[in-house]
Image (spheres, rainbow, N blue to C red):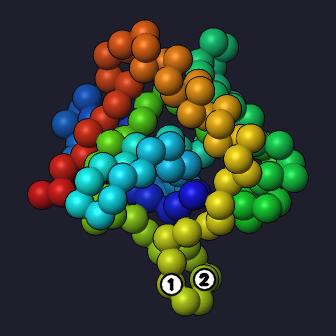
Amino acid sequence: MVLRYRFLWAHEAERGQAEGAKDPPVVVLILMADGEEAVVAPITTVAPEAGAPAIEIPPRARAHLGLDADQCWISIATLNRFVWPGPDLRAVPDRTPRTALYRYIPQKLLDAARNTAIAELSKRVPGLIVSRSTE
């Protein structure tokens, strides 16, 4: 799934923020049952720095997801983990009925994002996962 979510970047968490400043679309990498956990990766229009883990979203997939930017990437530089569904899901603007769901991501793109996330997690990079509280 691609959802609208109040994403907390690692640099925001390091500054002591409990909530992110923006509501970007995110890709759900892992989703457990209600009351369990989800792990999401943000979709950004900012090109990744050289060597930063990211997956470019092809034009056809961007159109399918309803993303209007010329270029987008799934960033794997920071992931958020939270109790599902959590208070940080946001309604997609101009959708009736109100929903946080943009659309379902193509499986090939989801697999690429998951594989990249697994590779990054295996490196045990400090700050890769920002755990969000429900409080």
Q: In this view, does 92 lie to the left or right of 36?
A: right
Q: Farthest residue in the bottom direction?
A: 97
x and y, in percent, of residue 110 in the image: 64, 42
* Pick the front one: 42 or 68: 42
Q: In this view, does 32 lie above or below 119?
A: below
Q: Which residue is drawn at 50% across and 50% down?
A: 28
Q: Distance between the residues labelled 2 and 1?
A: 5 Å
- Amino acid under disc 2: Arg
- The answer to whether 74 appears left or right of 90 in the picture is right
User: What's the residue at 50%, 84% (across, down)?
Assistant: 98
Q: Eyeballing the image, is 124 above or below 6?
A: above
Q: Which residue lies furthest to the left in this view?
A: 135
Quarter occupied by residue 103 = bottom right
Q: Are marks 2 and 1 in contact (CB under 8 Å)?
A: yes
The answer to which quarter of the image holds residue 124 is: top left
Location of residue 78 with respect to 19 vertically, above or below? above
